[in-house]
Amino acid sequence: LESGALSKVRRMLNAMAAVDIAHLLEASTPKVRKVLWELVDKESEGEVLQHLSDELQGHFLSDMSAEEVADVTADLDTDDVADMLQQLPERVTQEVLSSMDRQDRVRIESILEYPEDCAGGLMNTDTVTIRPDITLEVTLRYLRRHKTLPDMTDNLLVVNRQNEFIGVLPINKLLVSDPQQTVREVMNTDSKVIHADLHETEVAKLFERHDLVSAPVVNLAGELLGRITIDDVVDVIRENADHSLMSMAGLDEEEDTFAPAMKTSRRRAVWLGINLITAFIASAVIGLFDKTIEQVVALAVLMPIVASMGGIAGSQVLTLVIRGQALGHLSGANFRWLFNRELIVAGVNGSLWALVIAAITFVWFNDPIIAAIIGAAIIINLFVAAISGAALPLILKARGIDPALAGSVILTTVTDVVGFLSFLGLATIFYL
Amino acid sequence: LESGALSKVRRMLNAMAAVDIAHLLEASTPKVRKVLWELVDKESEGEVLQHLSDELQGHFLSDMSAEEVADVTADLDTDDVADMLQQLPERVTQEVLSSMDRQDRVRIESILEYPEDCAGGLMNTDTVTIRPDITLEVTLRYLRRHKTLPDMTDNLLVVNRQNEFIGVLPINKLLVSDPQQTVREVMNTDSKVIHADLHETEVAKLFERHDLVSAPVVNLAGELLGRITIDDVVDVIRENADHSLMSMAGLDEEEDTFAPAMKTSRRRAVWLGINLITAFIASAVIGLFDKTIEQVVALAVLMPIVASMGGIAGSQVLTLVIRGQALGHLSGANFRWLFNRELIVAGVNGSLWALVIAAITFVWFNDPIIAAIIGAAIIINLFVAAISGAALPLILKARGIDPALAGSVILTTVTDVVGFLSFLGLATIFYL
């Protein structure tokens, strides 16, 4: 690119909204990304950073000095600054904080006290608070003294002198009520309040179920700390939903689509290595029956069918249960029902496909024994697939292991081993 | 359950919020679900229905007469009523509509004109509209004449006499501006406007990128039809994200966790049948080499490793590309880069794991030829896996086929066939 074209690109780029620049960066290859980032105006950098995925934020922030970070984040919402600082090493974070003005530092430190994945880490401190004893008319005059109100201010938060949260005054109620009434008479005291240490998944469920735009966050003493807004919750919902999909393929939900080849290779290698272990376990099982296979080669031809049908049937149950867990559908009582239902399904589909596969096998090899054996092995493997697909997520979750990440590897190992064992084992009994 | 306990359950149930009753129904087994539904108060039925998944809505609605449907939906938002009617047969929908009062019917028919999955089907008609020439003071007085404002009213919509959309007056701006100014002076004319035929996925992207709470919907003539609110968009985001996860296991994103056994069996049978075809194709490939396997049984022991490593590597690429498509990251130019990156990753990981697998094979079977052959087959299959994992989603999408649904089946067929073909083919060349 010559410098003339470059300055044209610079103009076009900086005419875009920050969120669109961020999207363009995420959808660019590393080299283009680097060039584009250098063309972004200094004063827009903070806003662009805020819209990038964690991985890319960390990438660009790691090239900046502490003062530069403090500089570009100066105009951002406190929760977004806190998010960014969590991508930096502890030492740099401290440096950045110490180069901020006192008020900002105190606010951001109050967010950093909480883990990134709980309400305290998700909240923003830009609340509009009022006292309960003033009238709505005074409230309206007070609001008019502001130049702007924070985005997504659907509620004014009512606190007492000790900053303890008392209730919310919905803006929509403020607008339709008699101005002579007091805040206390009009406010809602039964609105949803979020404790700072509630996990973000639970926060998202509250927002989804009760159609919230924002919700106040309090500490254990009931003091108002800040508020969470729906835009940040939408990100949580998106990430949680992506998590199951990506984890089942051994990927991270924050995975950069355009990560460099070497970084990608290293990450993928781990997953391939884990799966190689399961593949060798399956091979070892086949190895036990090499004498049988030597006599009846048809067994080698047919054995992948048994393993594969088990894997497919199992992964359907596994996916359904993992989604059910995420939606909060599964408890002790109804899990028993689900488990029994899956056994019935395995019985019905096992018998159906065992018959089909046995028939095809009989036509192909003209051997009734091998047809009967493969039918029996299919039924056995579909039952085992149903049991492990349903039980694995519960067992793993109880042990604090992520079912989406570990579930499919373990399931495949089980259905491969049982598939080969039942098919080749039965064959050994009948042929040798 | 005796009748005493039942009436206690009834009291507890109807003390719950409609959304929590809906969640309880979704998390219940069919029998419990039926009992609970009968206990729900008639006047709450509509609100509970509105929070249920499409499948369950359809289930309960199909047991009701047209008048009953019109009755329970009378107090609901128009967009929710339209959603429900779409679960019913056309004939019943017409009956329900004709038993509604005129105003409701006209509103709901205007939504039903649009497909369920576009902006027109997602919108609500409960807008608060104002004219541009009035002052903010008059606007405030006009609002005070309302008893309540619709939920999530963050903007008043400004229209001219022809009902053409002109701009929005954010409530937050109304509250901080000089009351003597006119709406025209204060309103935003550059806010996001959504055309009624925009697909819901694009609507969700607009809301996510621009942190919207609500957005006006217009027709091609620029007339205001209604507005879309974030609560409905959150449902779209959740469903779209679930779609990829569930489709890859051949499941539907609206799948009822507690569907009856027979219904479940029938649905799953289809997916197993499709996968059986791919399994038999792989078997047929192995069958081509039965003479080779007869001579060297170790081939039968090792061949699943080649197929399985290809499947795992391919599904990682496939998942990444499908997610990239959903996020709108992939275009012609950067896809070439991604494709090349995946070839490099396949080269690096192929060589690495080929060496490891060859070494283990050599130690296990003490045969340098079979070790070299499996190493070569692994490299070949990892390259093919990278190419198909990256290319398949693009090819399928271009042909209007859902990559999440069809991608993994086709990918597995390719990696199985190539895995067996390369390993057993090379062995045939070297051993026979």
Image: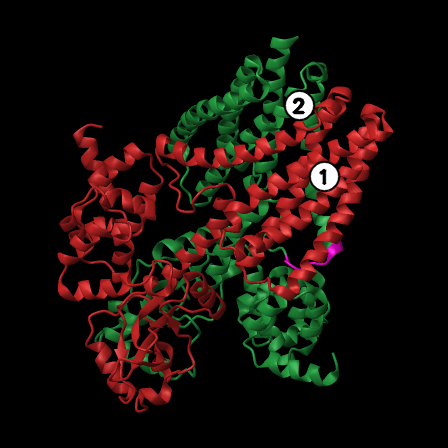
Chain colours: A red, B green
- Circle 2: residue type: Ala
Query: Magenta-highlighted stretch: main secondary structure?
Result: loop
Q: Is residue B232 magenta?
A: no
Q: Which residue is mark 1?
A: B273
Q: Start and end of the magenta stretch?
A: B256-262
SS at circle 1: helix
Q: Is residue B387 left or right of residue B153?
A: right
- Circle 1: residue type: Gly
Asked whether A336 or B402 is in front, the reply is A336
- Quadrant into which the N terminus of chain B falls: bottom right
Q: Is residue B350 left or right of residue B286?
A: left
Asked whether A229 or B356 is in front, the reply is B356
Vertically, is B317 above or below B91? above
Where in the figure is residue B369, as x and y percent of width and height?
A: 56, 12
Chain containing mark 1: B
Residue B179 appearing in the image: no
Question: Which residue is painted at 62% across and 33% down in the image?
Answer: A282
Where in the figure is residue A242, as x and y percent of width and height?
A: 47, 49
Q: Is residue B87 left or right of residue A199?
A: right
- Crowding around mark 2 (Cα neighbors within 10 Å: few <14, some 14 to 19, many 20+) is many
- Along the polypeptide, which appears first: circle 1 or circle 2? 1
Disc on res. B263: none
Q: Is residue A155 left or right of residue A358?
A: left
Q: CA distance from mark 1 to mark 2?
A: 25 Å
Vertically, is A244 above or below B183? above
- Quadrant into which the C terminus of chain B falls: top right
Asked whether A222 or B127 is in front, the reply is A222
Write down the quadrant of residue A140 in the picture.
Answer: bottom left
SS at circle 2: helix
- Do marks 1 and 2 share a chain? yes
Disc on res. B300: 2
